[in-house]
Image (spheres, rainbow, N blue to C red):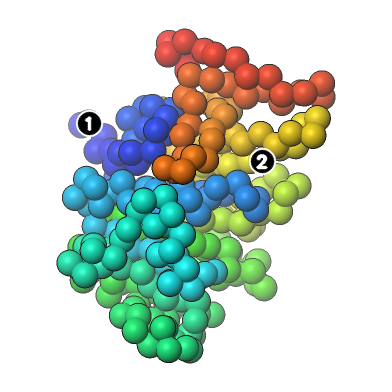
């Protein structure tokens, strides 16, 4: 039986994923500050809207108004989709405090209450018919209680997969951390995409690697990427090698990648 895939629409990503993310997978989008996690997750939702796939964005670390402004800077104006009911932002940041927050439709009154967040998220998914969901960032839910990280991700996974969505959970890690944003979360997630920003000889280089992805073959190489004014572009035909002497990019054939 062929694997049903969700195309991310992000240049280069579907190629290294062998055609896209298996439907219903819950993917951890992990990386340090400034690596492009939020941009990639928002680009994934925007591309879904262009393909006729409704989406939901859960804002845990930023005001929904700022989310809309940031997306619009890349040409991703989600307001028309909100008006027609195919896109929603769940406000899990303000707690409903402030004049602009009062105008938000989906508000988590206590952002620290995971059960309450899930209730609001379910409502947003059902109202929009969402096929794509982003939670940014899931780390916020267990930042002060890392021991519950795996159980939180498993709880979200049951809901998101059960409702038929293919989802990104943005996961924060420190610059030097080799993990994925919490003890055990790598086992709970169906997939892990790790984004990195390395300083080599005074220059910052962006790269990503698909650490795992259940249900599909994928590239095992580290690929360079750029953030442009239209979003992220991944160079699927290039490999980034980081050595003690510096950074090397090499072009690989499609057969090798």
SS type, badge 2: strand
Image-based side of 233 in relation to 202, left or right: left
Looking at the rendered image, the quarter that the N terminus falls into is top left
Placement of 191 over or under 79, stated as above or below: above
Placement of 54 over or under 141, stated as above or below: above
Residue lying at 67% horizontally and 73% vertically, measured from the top left? 144
Residue lying at 38% horizontally and 27% vertically, measured from the top left? 15
Residue hosting label 1: 2
Marks 1 and 2 sit apart, C-alpha to C-alpha, by 36 Å
Placement of 166 over or under 56, stated as above or below: above
Q: Quadrant of residue 158?
A: bottom left
> Camera-side residue: 220 or 250?
250
Percent coordinates x, y for residue 181 in the rendering = 62, 55
Percent coordinates x, y for residue 154 in the rendering = 46, 61
Percent coordinates x, y for residue 56 in the rendering = 33, 63
SS type, badge 1: loop
Image-based side of 198 in relation to 168, left or right: right
Query: Of circles 1 and 2, which is in front?
Result: 2
Percent coordinates x, y for residue 40 in the rendering = 46, 47
Label 2 crowd bin: few (<14), some (14–19), many (20+), radius 10 Å: some
Counting the numbered discs, the total is 2
Residue hosting label 2: 197
Residue 56: tell me if it is visible. Answer: yes
Residue 125: tell me if it is visible. Answer: no
Q: Earlier in the sequence, mark 1 or mark 2?
A: 1
- For residue 17, which numbered disc appears in the image? none
Residue lying at 43% horizontally and 63% vertically, measured from the top left? 69
Residue lying at 29% horizontally and 65% vertically, measured from the top left? 79
Placement of 246 over or under 4, stated as above or below: above
């Amino acid at each position: 039986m062929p694997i049903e895939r969700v195309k991310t629409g992000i240049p280069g990503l579907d190629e290294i994923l062998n055609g896209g993310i298996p439907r219903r997978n819950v993917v951890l989008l992990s990386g340090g500050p400034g690596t492009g996690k939020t941009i990639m997750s928002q680009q994934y939702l925007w591309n879904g809207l262009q393909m006729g796939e409704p989406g939901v964005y859960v804002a845990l670390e930023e005001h929904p108004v700022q989310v809309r402004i940031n997306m619009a800077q890349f040409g991703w104006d989600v307001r028309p989709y909100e008006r027609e009911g195919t896109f929603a932002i769940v406000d899990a940041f303000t707690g409903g405090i402030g004049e602009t927050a009062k105008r938000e439709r989906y508000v988590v009154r206590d952002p620290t209450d995971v059960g309450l967040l899930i209730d609001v998220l379910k409502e947003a998914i059902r109202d929009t018919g969402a096929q794509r969901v982003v939670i940014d960032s899931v780390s916020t839910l267990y930042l002060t209680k890392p021991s519950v990280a795996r159980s939180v991700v498993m709880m979200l996974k049951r809901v998101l997969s059960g409702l038929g969505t293919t989802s990104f959970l943005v996961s924060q890690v420190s610059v030097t951390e080799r993990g994925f944003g919490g003890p055990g979360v790598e086992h709970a997630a169906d997939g892990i995409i790790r984004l990195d920003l390395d300083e080599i000889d005074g220059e910052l280089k962006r790269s990503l690697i698909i650490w795992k992805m259940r249900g599909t073959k994928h590239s095992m190489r580290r690929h360079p990427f750029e953030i442009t004014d239209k979003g992220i572009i991944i160079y699927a035909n290039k490999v980034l090698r980081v050595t003690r002497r510096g950074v090397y990019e090499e072009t690989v054939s499609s057969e090798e990648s």
